[in-house]
Amino acid sequence: MIMTTQYFIPILALVFLYGVIIGSFLNVCIYRIPKKENIAIVRSHCMTCDHQLKWYDNIPLISWIMLRGRCRYCKAPISPQYPIIEASNGLLWLLVFTVNAYAGNNAWSIDAAMIVDSLLYCLLTSALLTLSVIDFRTYEIPIGINIFILALGLIMTAYHYTGWLDHVIGFFAVSIPIQIIIIATKGRGFGGGDMKLMAVAGLMLGWKLIVLAFALGCIVGAPIHLIRMKVSGADRVLAMGPYLSVGIFWAFMWGNSLIDWYLRLAGF
């Protein structure tokens, strides 16, 4: 179905709203997963006074703003991470949906394939955002998030079954070289979480895009970490998860266009 911008804006507003709501859940995952806490059963509570929060204390974005960034009960500061993650996830979902739906000339195309792809990529984006924050803080990519991305990859492969071989090759295209590096460097080059991430993301993206994602992640990660080491005295140990996530996001958003541009430039 083709629609004009006027009719597409309410859909975008709904996508942003859902993204913000999921972003609130991501904050729960970011806090509880490293602590091995249950993300579904334990009720939300203040990190300072441990008071259980009411539903109106947990409205994404709005509650933090209305409370001016402080707990309603003990007045302790609430980390700005909460609205930042919520808003970031909403904006990223908006970007994913917009890029996938744009048909040119201020027209938007919505069909079943576009909705499925957008939903899977939105969920992948949320998983990448979550693991990036956790890996940056703990130098560990939770296995549960990789399993979640694996499930998304299986759904994507089944939905685009005619290209299943491309996705299966993608599972091994980068993960095997990383595993070789891990063995050769005795774990100093990459971590096991990095290898698993590129395997499951490769299943979802296919071999061309995952190779591009890996290259982009390394290109982004190396100079930024060198700058962080120089400016802020960051440790020499590099958490690759955030940089690989940037590469993966860029690859599934604009990777095919980038590959086509490079092939034209090279004369292929």
Image (tube, rainbow, N blue to C red):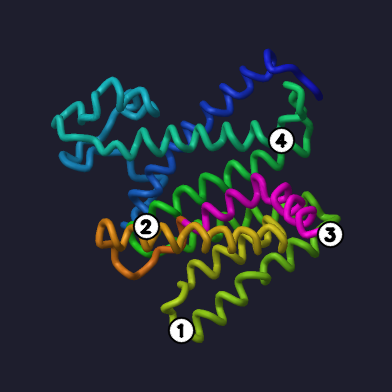
Label 1 close to label 2 by CB (< 8 Å):
no
Label 4 close to label 1 by CB (< 8 Å):
no
Q: From the viewer's perspective, is the residue at label 3 or at label 4 nearer?
A: 3
What span is colored magenta in the figure? 243-268
User: Residue 240 bears which disc, if any?
Assistant: none
Q: CA distance from mark 3 to mark 2?
A: 39 Å
Q: Residues within 10 Å of mark 2 (few under 14, many from 20)?
A: some
Q: Could you say whether the residue bearing mark 4 is in a helix, strand or loop?
A: helix
User: Residue 185 bears which disc, if any?
Assistant: 1
- Residue drawn 71% across the image and 63% down it: 207
Q: Could you say whether the residue bearing mark 3 is in a helix, strand or loop?
A: loop
Q: Residues within 10 Å of mark 4 (few under 14, many from 20)?
A: some
Label 3 close to label 2 by CB (< 8 Å):
no
Q: Could you say whether the residue bearing mark 1 is in a helix, strand or loop?
A: helix
Q: Where residue 141 sits: x, y (%)?
A: 44, 62
- Report the residue marked by disc 3: 268
- Report the residue marked by disc 4: 115
Q: Within the magenta stretch, is there residue 110? A: no
Q: Where residue 35 sits: x, y (%)?
A: 31, 57
Q: Is residue 205 above or below residue 126?
A: below
- Report the residue marked by disc 2: 136
Q: Where residue 31 sits: x, y (%)?
A: 33, 49
Secondary structure mainly formed by the magenta segment: helix
- Residue drawn 45% across the image and 36% down it: 88
Q: Residues within 10 Å of mark 1 (few under 14, many from 20)?
A: few
Q: CA distance from mark 3 to mark 4?
A: 32 Å
